[in-house]
Amino acid sequence: MAYVISTINLKGGVGKTTTTIGLAEMLSVEFGKRVLVVDLDPQTNATTVLVGEDRWRDLNAQKHTLVTLFTDALRPDGELAEFDLDATLQRKVSPVAEVQSVDLLPSSLDLIDVQDRLASMPSGRFYSNNPTDLLRKAVRPILENYDFVLVDCPPNLGIVTLNGLRISDGYIIPTIPDVLSTYGIPQIQARVKAFADNLGETIHEIGIVVTKYRSASTVHRTTIDRLLNDEELPPVFETVVPEGNAIAASAEFSSMSTLRQKYQYQGGYEVFRNLAKEFIEAVEETA
């Protein structure tokens, strides 16, 4: 079975999707891993980075996104379900030609409207339906096909995020090293632990990934020191993702041959390769 790891932060714009995609593509190319990206974020950034906006629009129009899984749960008993896992699963995604083993379960903007309604979904026969268990039931048949599953969660702790955590062995927190971006980390820890305890399971704190780092910033340097010295927080990855044009541009859907081209030979390739290596070691250590 795959190692399933969620990426989460309560603040948007912290490099969460860039980190997820960088890890997925690097795990595929440099480490020969089979990777599934599960995009639960209604902003659909991971989806459009991997398949482009045109293909996403087609998938959304055909109801081949994860929102269909959740809207099915809101249907009255007896109504025909529309979610088709095989049609929704997008194989060998990424505009980078050498990336050959990354698959995707795409997101939809419509997830924004669905999340609040999931709390009132029908309980099902014998009260067997749980709104946080929908994704697990749907993807369980395919998890054995992958080495790693990366779940890109929305910037909240709602029911859709809990679906991602429900299938996860652990989670990482990408964050800009400033006060606003790191403020919610203890809340994430407490909520995830309470959720896992309620399930009778463990969801491991894999670590904090520092993103958009500016070495000239005193705030960034002092925040990293605070994260490193706070024993109550998750461990901090040694690899730091710097702020830079090449890494920022990596979030665009653009065809090219290699990941080295994608990161424009400006150190981004080495950063994500080092991060992926450290990520594998951290995940395997918790297993």
Image (tube, rainbow, N blue to C red):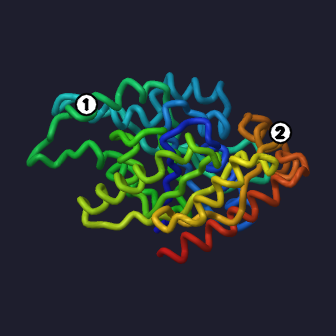
> In terms of depth relative to the viewer, which is nearer, 51 or 219?
219
Tell me what residue is drawn at x 53 percent, y 77 percent: 285
Residue 6 at what x, y percent from top left?
Answer: 49, 53
Is residue 31 visible to the viewer in this orientation of the structure? Answer: yes
Residue 245 at what x, y percent from top left?
Answer: 83, 39
Tell me what residue is drawn at x 88 percent, y 47 percent: 261
Q: How many marks?
A: 2
Is residue 87 visible to the viewer in this orientation of the structure? Answer: no
Q: Estimate the spatial distance between the alpha carbons at disc 1 and disc 2, rounded to whole Å.
A: 43 Å
Closer to the chain start, of discs 1 and 2, is 1
Residue 113 at what x, y percent from top left?
Answer: 37, 24
Direction left: furthest residue: 126
At mark 1, the secondary structure is loop
Direction right: furthest residue: 265
92 left or right of 145 in image: right
> In terms of depth relative to the viewer, which is nearer, 256 or 243?
243
Residue 66 at what x, y percent from top left?
Answer: 44, 37
Q: Which residue is mark 1?
A: 74
The amino acid sitting under disc 2 is Asn
Q: Which residue is mark 2?
A: 245
Tell me what residue is drawn at x 47 percent, y 75 percent: 287
74 left or right of 182 in image: left
